[in-house]
Image (spheres, grey):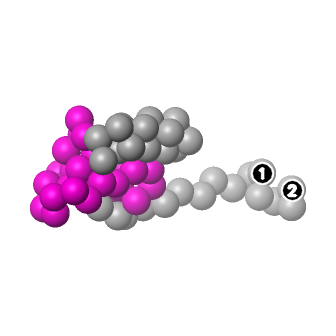
Amino acid sequence: MLDNINKAIITSGGVSTKEVNPKTMESKIVSNLYFAGEVIDVAGDLGGFNLHWAWASGRVAGENA
């Protein structure tokens, strides 16, 4: 278990940020389809704040769905 402390794991890939409206989290391709969290490819943009991203994007998606 202690070996996991020395490792970092990230998720990469997913829905391109170019395909998502950042103000609503709605797909630009499919109407009424919303994304949040790590399903969106933001690994390089997050800087390690994936929990904050999950909550913030989830709230925006929920308010606009």
In this figure, which residue is indicated by the disc labeled 1?
5
Residue flagged by tag 1: what amino acid is it? Ile
> Residue 21: horizontal and vertical position, in percent?
19, 44
Instruction: Find out whether the residues at labels 2 and 1 contact each other: C-beta distance under 8 Å.
Output: yes
Hey, which residue is sitting farthest right in the picture?
1
Please say whether residue 48 is one of the residues in the magenta stretch.
no
Q: Which residue corresponds to the image point at 16% horizontal and 58% vertical from the top-left?
A: 31
Looking at the rendered structure, the secondary structure element under dot 1 is helix
Q: Which residue corresponds to the image point at 49% horizontal and 44% vertical from the top-left?
A: 54
Q: Nearer the viewer, residue 19 or 65?
A: 65
Q: Which residue corresponds to the image point at 77% horizontal and 58% vertical from the top-left?
A: 4
Hey, which residue is sitting farthest left in the picture?
29
> Residue 24: horizontal and vertical position, in percent?
25, 40
In this figure, which residue is indicated by the disc labeled 2?
2
Label 1 Cα crowd, 10 Å radius (few <14 / some 14-19 / many 20+) = few
Q: Which residue corresponds to the image point at 35% horizontal and 38% vertical from the top-left?
A: 63
Residue flagged by tag 2: what amino acid is it? Leu
Q: Is residue 11 above or below residue 45?
A: below
Label 2 Cα crowd, 10 Å radius (few <14 / some 14-19 / many 20+) = few
Looking at the rendered structure, the secondary structure element under dot 2 is helix
SS majority, magenta: loop
Q: Which residues are magenta?
A: 17-46
Distance (Cα) linking label 2 and label 1: 5 Å
